[in-house]
Amino acid sequence: MDRSETLIIGGGNAGISLAAKLLRDGASGVTVVAPQPLHRYKPLLNYVGGGEATMADLERPMADVVPDGCEWIRDSVDAVDAAASTVHTRAGRTLRYSALVLCPGLEEDWAATPGLQEAYADGWAASTYVPGSTPQVWPRLSSLRSGSVVFTVPPEPASCGPTALKPLLMACDHWRRRGVLADLEVRLLLPGTTATGVPRADEVLEAAFADYGVEVLRESRVERVDPDVHAITVASPTGPRVLDDVAFAHAVPRYRAPRWIADSGLAADADPGLVDVDPSTLQHRRHESVWGLGDAAELRTRPSGGALRKQVAVLSANLAAARDGGRLQRYDGYTVVPITVSRRKLMLAESDRDGRLTPSVPFVDPITPRRVTWWADRHALPQVYWRRILRGRI
């Protein structure tokens, strides 16, 4: 039976950057369990969908990003027995741990939207949130000259949901430059009344929607899809509405946590089954040796890469404090949502758990869209990610 001091479930940004931080801080016995052969820098998927990046820009072999000194078990988790401090894998292994960190990410819940998976298979729908479909997005969007096109922002839980606006606003800018925007009927489905819940950021985005002529359907989501006739049924407060003759749908699927979290008694509730942690300390509410961070943890803040940087720092310190009997640090819910408002300008909505603005650069208003902010998001941050974040240096 394998044993680790710290067993991390998940090999995305959360799992790899935490493993690297722990090792850099002097920890030993760190293991990551992750099945995927590739590691992706997910924020660049939106730029692939906007024609400004390729899949090769955001993918690396998993073996290249697992930090030295960390054991990588290429397997999937089937169950956790927190009382026995064990994890059971799909390949039949039993892994023991002193501390368990859950950051497996979210899974597409295709069953929640009948017909959507078939629409993806047909190529009529795609999104930057599903990597296998991402390369189809820009060729479809850039070729449109008329007709109806629908974009959606996914309801929670989702990985930084409002960034699904990036392909919409980059495409609108492209269509305007090509002189075809007026011939397109562009609709946006928002799960809430506003795009981000950060008032100043929403003001900027509402102005952009109005400027591009986007029809915004609020408190709405895709109920079902009929790919044969290119129709989308939308659920809204005023009742169902059918959008017919849709030329293309950038429709993000619903998401949920892996089912083994709820099945193992570690979830806050049965649906969507997020890990039940104290949102400040990241420690499980019922099992002291279990911790959670990232998209699949119930942290009462919007998941993002910027949020993970804060979470990793707090959790690394708290794992050491729990081991040594020290005082736990607290995470204030900081998150950041980067959204392009055109092909070369981007705004940052930085806020804490209560929606208060928390800009990270003094004397600079991150809400104001800037070309330099776009350049940093598209070009600088990916290099920081590969060279520093995944190596535990931030």
Image: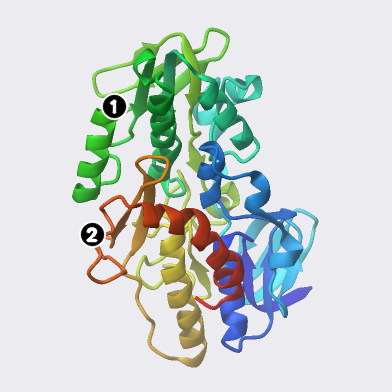
Image point (34%, 17%), residue name: 182
Pick the front one: 268 or 245: 245
Badge 2: how crowded within 10 Å, few (<14), some, or many (20+)?
Answer: few
Between the residue at mark 1 and the residue at mark 2, the CA separation in whole angstroms equals 25 Å
Amino acid at dot 2: Asp
Residue that mark 2 sits on: 354
Amino acid at dot 1: Val
Q: Nearer the viewer, mark 1 or mark 2?
A: 1
Q: How far across and how far down the image is residue 112, in percent? A: 50, 30
Image point (64%, 19%), residue name: 122
Dividing the picture into quarters, in which one does residue 334 lie? bottom left
Residue 297 appears left or right of 385: left
Whether 213 is drawn above or below 258: the answer is above
Residue that mark 1 sits on: 216
Image point (38%, 12%), residue name: 242
Q: How far across and how far down the image is residue 169, in percent? A: 38, 35
Pick the front one: 390 or 70: 390
Q: Quadrant of the N terminus?
A: bottom right
Q: Are marks 1 and 2 in contact (CB under 8 Å)?
A: no
Question: At numbered mark 1, what does the secondary structure look like: helix, strand or loop?
Answer: strand
Q: How far across and how far down the image is residue 309, in percent? A: 46, 69
